[in-house]
Image (spheres, rainbow, N blue to C red):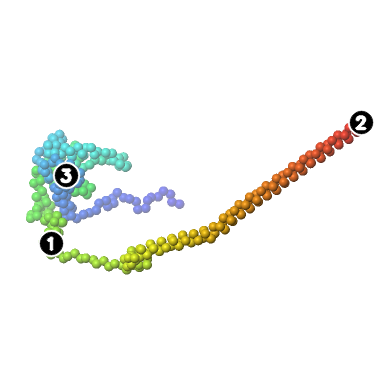
Amino acid sequence: MCRKGHMFAPLKVYRKWHQKTNLNERRHAVASALAASAVTPLVMARGHKIEKIPEIPLVVDALDSTKAKDILKALLNVGLGDELRRVALSKKIRAGKGKMRNRRYVKKRGPLIVHDITEKSVRLGARNLMGVDTCRVQKLNILQLAPGGHVGRLIIWTKKAFQNLNTIFGTYKTAGTEKGGYRLQRHLLGSADLSRLINSDQIQSVIRAPKTNEVHNRKKNPLRNTQEMRRLNPFEAQRKKLDQQLQEKRSEARKAKINKKRGKLGQDFIKDFHKNVQESQKRDEDIWYAKDSAEEEEENGEEDDDNNNAGGDDDDNEEDAE
């Protein structure tokens, strides 16, 4: 008999938690996320408040400070007050059991400050600002550039970090020096407006005409399909109407004939029936009254006999006493 024991194929902490991705694919993903952060509609689609920001991408050169109040003042000067307020008001208690596992609160993601590796004071000054993250331009993280898989993160660039992008990722003509010769992918389309491209005269002049599918009508049985019968015989609806009227006239004539034939006989029968019923009721009442009176007479006669017998017994008793 087995007692206790252990789980079959128990879960181990050293399982394969992550899935490996090719290095070049990861670099393409980072470059795509950076490009999406410069598209205003994508940034607004993520929920960022950028109505008061002068431009996208936003490049500033006044974030070299270790004080949080200086960094906050610089962010407010460039029009990020609504964005920081949105993040502060979004702090809520997590739903579920995660609130008991050292992750009690959740909040929305705010702006991301990308700085150069030499600007360490930016990371120290912005670490206490709610919703504001920092990242080095030499170590860009796809999880910070596209949280939850949604591109369009609001990024605040320092001047040095923005200037180092060409040396890190390279350009279309030159390879990057810090990414092992990585080259940016070229655009397959010069214009992303597909409807404009398809409807242009150059493309419409060479494409073939659209095909037209000939629809063959399915043969229908006019004896079962009313619409098909009306199409073949337009008088069909009038014929049905006339047949219905003729049938109604025949039914009315038949009812009148039956009422005429059975009217007198039916009235005589009803009169005789009521007369017989009344006579039978009267006869039953007479029999019942006669029977009741006979029973009463019998009871009265029995009482008289009992009284006579009782009187004779008393006389006999008196004689015996004398």
Above/below status of 193 relative to 94: below
Kindly state the secondary structure of the residue where label 1 is placed.
helix
Q: In this view, does 255 lie to the left or right of 303?
A: left
Callout in the foreground (2, 3): 2
Q: Name the residue under label 1.
A: 203
Residue at point 57% right, 58% down?
265
Q: In this view, does 259 lie to the left or right of 46?
A: right
Q: Mark 2 points at which residue?
A: 322
Q: Which amino acid does label 3 sit on?
A: Leu
Callout in the foreground (3, 1): 1
Q: Which amino acid does label 2 sit on?
A: Glu
Residue at point 42% right, 63% down?
246
Residue 8 in sight here: yes
Instruction: Say which of 178 and 70 sits in front.
Output: 70
Alpha carbons under labels 3 and 1: distance apart: 38 Å
Instruction: Say which of 286 and 41 sits in front.
Output: 286
Residue 154 image label = 3
Crowd rating for badge 1 (residues with CA inside 10 Å; few <14, some 14–19, many 20+): few
Q: What residue type is labelled 1?
A: Ile
Identify the mark nearer the N-term, 2 or 3.
Answer: 3
Q: Is residue 232 left or right of residue 133?
A: right
Kindly state the secondary structure of the residue where label 2 is placed.
loop
Residue at point 10% right, 48% down?
165
Residue 124 in sight here: no
Callout in the foreground (1, 2): 2
The percent position of residue 270, horizontal first and vertical second, equals 58, 54
Furthest-top residue in this view = 322
Instruction: Say which of 115 and 238 sits in front.
Output: 238
